Amino acid sequence: MRPPLPADRFVMELLQLSRESQGYKELLAKFADYLKVKLEVDEAVIKDFQGSAFASSDEVTLNTGKPYIDNGLSGYSAFPELIEYSNRGFKCCAILPIVRGGKQFGTITLLSRDEKGFVPENVNLISVASTVISSEIGSKYEIDKSLNVAKYFDASFNNLMPQLLVGTDGRIVKANKTALNYFDKSQKELSNINLSDIFDIDNVSIERLNRGLVVETFGKSYRNRSFEISPSRVNDSLIHLMINDVSEAKDAEERARMLDRSGDDAFLVTDKDFEVLWASKGTYPLFGIQREMMVGRKFTDFVVVPNTMKDILQKLSANVYSGDVKLDFGNDTYFYGRLAAYREGSEFYCIVSRDYMRYIKSAEELSRSIVKISNDPIIEVDGSGYMLSYNKSAESLFKLDNSRIGTPIYGICADSESQNKIAASLAIAKKNGYIEDVYVSLIESKNRSSIPCVQKIKAVADKNGSAASFIIVNRELLTKKNIEELGEQLQAAQKEAEKLKTESDLKSQFIYNISHDLKTPITNIMGFSKLLLTDNAETLTKEQMDYIQIIYDESERFLELVKQILDVAKLQSGIVKLDTQQVNFNEIRNNPSIKSLAEACENKGLGFVWDVDYDVPEIPADPNRLIQVFSNLIGNAIKFTDRGEIRVRVMKKKGSVRVEVSDTGIGISKADIPKIFKKFYQLRRGLVKQEGSGTGLGLSIAKEVVNLHGGRIGVESEVGKGSTFWFTIPPLARIKKRALKYNRAEHQTP
């Protein structure tokens, strides 16, 4: 290695690199390149705290805050990763921790093939470099964090959506102009209150926001308004919230659900731009695509005939449009049928049907069909307030019969004030087409008592566009109160569920922390045991050597158990990130772990076959995690197979790659198959657990890894005839989608 630089010059050049770098990640890379050149090492490996997996040696240096120097890398090095470096031809390494004020930023590992190692002078420079780099990285990180906060402020003040900057306790720190106008408060007023002062929100919901989860709620001063609050973390103490008023979409969906009984017909609700807000159950049997695939797309984009559909819908008022329609859903999927559509305010209601005549006679008939299936009491009156028809709910509640047809609706009003309100509301609906939130008192038939109701009134137009009649929808406030009580019970149940989940998370974190703390002493025990076995063979008796070998073997088993528990904890917490690369299954066969398993088969007298179909492509996956799955499945197959062979087959199936690991072993009973992937579940031979059968975590880890890739895993087996474990790896797009929203649901169906 090159003779060391003067320490003052070394520090000055490091500081110059810091001044030339924009952010801490760029600075980290420049420091690594600089050290590689100045110390003439062969490789510099950077691991930063955002996403990198730290090895045991990294954790030791981060915990101590001091560089780790090893000038004699070999197969007996203290840490597994150092043994790996030795296998790659490196003779020495230096690991620099980047720690400032107790905050861990990462490590820089310097690797050299020079057998002379790091001389004392260079070791001193490495210590100086670690101190300087830690200080500069910490400063850059704080600057980057401040810039991120500033960006959030800029976005908030320049965006037309109401936005808030709040603390993790729910206290409002800042609001943009749109939020101030929406809530009719000054910046000072909003800055002195909590989220719970303007939204119907509690501590559980605030905790959900802290975890990055969207919360739906109501406004306290706007009880008829629904809000969707979307959070994003700014830093450890601030959250940026985007407030979206979803009342209209919720109301449209609620009204549309009344027509979800449309059988084989498809019913769609769109906004003014023809974007589908809701689709009925009939979408799939009619079009062959799921209703969820329609929502969020423009209905007019599907229409081929007539090509003027957008103009037709824009010109609709209360009249119904009907006509032939041809829809194109892509991939040569077409639908020919009839379309009936009408407009209500800023929304469009579209019915696509093969038997369409019942929908297109008139808007009046369509409105009456809605009336019949509603659980709310609905009454149709003419322009003077005389009743024309009513549904079953109104008939039962107000004790109406045929003799009441043609009589004024005012006869079921409990007082003159309610009569005047209905008369005035009919006049407004005649002019504007619609009115809601009309509070009246009506006479309930059973006890002849007064009940409070809120009404919505909709004008139904004739063929000339004039209001011919009115639909009055009544909603009992007593029923609404019951619904609110049920809502409170549901909220209490949700709080209990959140509490149980928090307790589960704490248990998982406890297991992770304990297992993590055990790794270092176990590794030291193994290292010293190995030294005793190799350096003291002549001074120790055979019995002493046997005892030390037992210590080493049991420590190795214990370390493997700790590693598996850590893997389970990491996978279940969702913090594991895939290092996705293009994987070739023919090359995986040559991996040392797979070769070792093949040798284990040979030593046991078993055949080992690795069969990859000719058309299997390279796939995007994390190769190390994939080998972990193979090791668990093949290792289990060897363990429970006494004769025959272990066969690995890789094939292409339905756009994914399917892997099967088959054996000729003892097989699995039908009772054991549903439990086989559960944590700590171990298959037994008869009533006695097999010696050395493991921890019961291998298959659980394999399942979590496959799920993280967006794939599925399962098993097919019969007692006495062997087992076939299989898993699938999907295309890259599905893996990315899965990683963004990691779902640990059960996947055991082929």
Image (cartoon, rainbow, N blue to C red):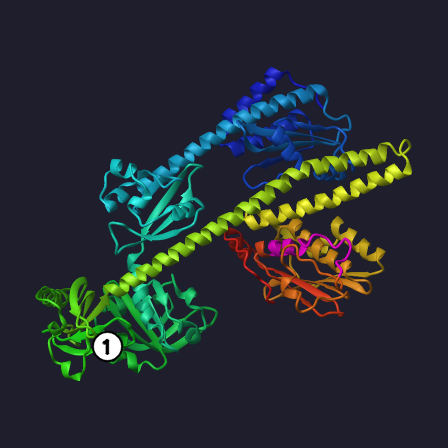
Say which residue appears at 57% left-offset and 50% top-offset.
Answer: 572
- Is 59 or 402 nearer to us in this picture? 402
Tell me, yes or no, whether the highlighted magenta stretch contains residue 695.
yes
Looking at the image, the residue that sits furthest to the front is: 447
Q: Where residue 194 sits in the image (x, y, percent)?
A: 32, 41
Q: Is residue 349 visible?
A: yes
| The C terminus - image quarter | bottom right
Span of residues in magenta: 688-706
Q: Hey, what amino acid is under mark 1?
A: Ser
User: Left or right of 523: which side holds 471?
Assistant: left
Q: Is residue 515 left or right of residue 379?
A: right
Q: Residue at x 66, y 20 (%)?
A: 124
Q: Is residue 72 above or below residue 744?
A: above
Regarding residue 272, the answer to whether it shows in the image is no
Task: Quarter of the image for the N terminus: give it.
Answer: top right
Quadrant in which residue 536 is drawn: top right
Where residue 138 sits: x, y (%)?
Answer: 51, 28
Q: Which of these two is toward me, 638 or 451?
A: 451
Q: Secondary structure at mark 1?
A: helix
The percent position of residue 45, horizontal first and vertical second, equals 64, 35
Task: Assess disc 1: are there few (<14), some (14-19) or many (≥20) residues with their C-alpha within 10 Å of its C-alpha.
Answer: some
Where residue 490 sits in the image (x, y, percent)? Answer: 38, 58
Number of labelled discs?
1
Q: Quadrant of residue 531?
A: top right
Q: Residue at x 80, y 36 (%)?
A: 530
Asked if 710 appears above or below 460 in the picture, the reply is above
Where does label 1 land, which residue? Answer: 396
Q: Tell me, yes or no, whether the highlighted magenta stretch contains residue 530.
A: no
Residue 141 left/right relative to 452: right
